Image: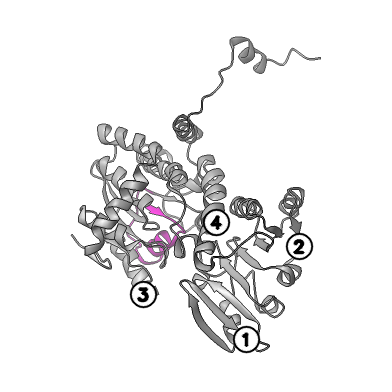
Amino acid sequence: MDHDIADPALAGAGALRIEWAGSRMPVLATVRERFEKDQTLAGKRIAACLHVTAETANLMLALRAGGAEVALCASNPLSTQDDVAAALVADGIPVFAIRAEDADTYYSHIRAVLDTEPHITMDDGADLVTVLLRERPNQDPVGSTEETTTGVVRLRAMAADGVLRFPVVAVNDSATKHLFDNRHGTGQSALDGIMRATNLLLAGKTVVVVGYGDCGVGVAARAAGMGAKVAVVEIDPVRALSAAMEGYQAVDADRAARIGDVFITVTGNLHVLRGEHYDVMKDGAILANAGHFDVELDLTELEKRATAKRRIRHELDEWTMPDGRRILVVSEGRLVNLSAAEGHPAEVMDMSFSNQALAAEWLLANTDDLGNEVYRLPEHLDREVAWIALEHLGGSLEKLTPEQESYLASWQQGT
């Protein structure tokens, strides 16, 4: 079996980590049990470019249980858990991922999983699909799935440009993904990464959240819950108004740069904090990025302005400005929740990865009816995931009476 990992000796520790995460992923366990019985993925090859974590490992095991041959590479150079990679290789699953791998190695690993000529690809950020479209003109999988907002934006641009050659399921658009993974997962894990890197007390600090989509909503809520004063930077007036009505300050980036103690970017856009912002930040300002790619903080401009740089703590760099102010950057501006912590808790990835597994099955079952477009996972599958998750939380649902069903289907009853 071909593979490329950091240290096979870490497999034992990785297996324990995978077991722990799996015990908190009841929805995926339910899907895996059905897959194992029905073998709906039998004989299919699946290439995945995802964060190599214990939760992802459980997805790989579920797909294999359904009969698929799977291969995995990392979707971010700093998100790989090397012990998990070793455990999967020991269990017979090819993995191409090494934490802190350089750009050349990162892309060589993507090419390695594409060499398996997959029927289905799974992506987190759309790098796998991008390489396939650019470099493999004769390689046409049945379809692909996409995990994150950034990847969906890229894929819709591909479809609009007419270069997408197969259907893609935007798993991120599923309610049981973005309402839970993005809000609760990012909210908790982004702050977890910042806490591990800094051991900072958030109470009383001003935390600036740049971007108030689902992820930003979660980050802001968790920061406020820990006693921080929250300011939100947005380009959308509706989202900015929503933030203001939650009790946060809605400010532009120039104002935010002057008042913030901690800055967390979560926009999916380029250079949302730039040189002019660094020029006015407080001494000791902390910068972290919770967006998928490491482009949200313009670190080239920070490097031009700084007179010195040193690694002051694990995953924390201190940049000294000419006037003596210090600006601290967590994890080189990479995805903070996975580079400085362990990523989202298993309970929310349970729903996201159940969607991934069901999306692969749905693509294979509906090949003849799909065009080269970006699709949303059918609502009944989304609701199935929600119902299983709710049951395992001890919840239940009310049922409509026949009279209520009749009323909702009628227009005749009024005042």
Q: How far apart are marks 3 and 2 (CA)?
A: 39 Å
Residue 124 lies in the magenta-colored region: yes
Q: State the count of labels.
A: 4
Which residue is tagged 4?
153
- Which amino acid, mark 4? Val
Q: Residue 305: which numbered mark, if any?
A: 1
Label 1 secondary element: helix
Mark 4 or mark 3: whose residue is earlier in sequence: 3
- Which amino acid, mark 3? Asp
Q: Report x, y in % for residue 7.
A: 25, 67
How many neighbours does mark 4 have within 10 angstroms: few (below 14), some (14-19), or many (20 or more)? some
Q: Which residue is drawn at 63% across and 66% down?
A: 263
Q: Distance between the residues labelled 2 and 4?
A: 25 Å
Q: Residue at x 75, y 65 (%)?
A: 252
Q: Report x, y in % for residue 132.
A: 37, 61
Q: How far apart are marks 3 and 1 (CA)?
A: 28 Å
Q: Report x, y in % for residue 410.
A: 68, 15
Label 2 secondary element: loop
Q: Determine contact: label 1, label 4, CB under 8 Å.
A: no
Q: Residue 104: which numbered mark, if any?
A: 3
Mark 3 or mark 2: whose residue is earlier in sequence: 3
Label 4 secondary element: helix
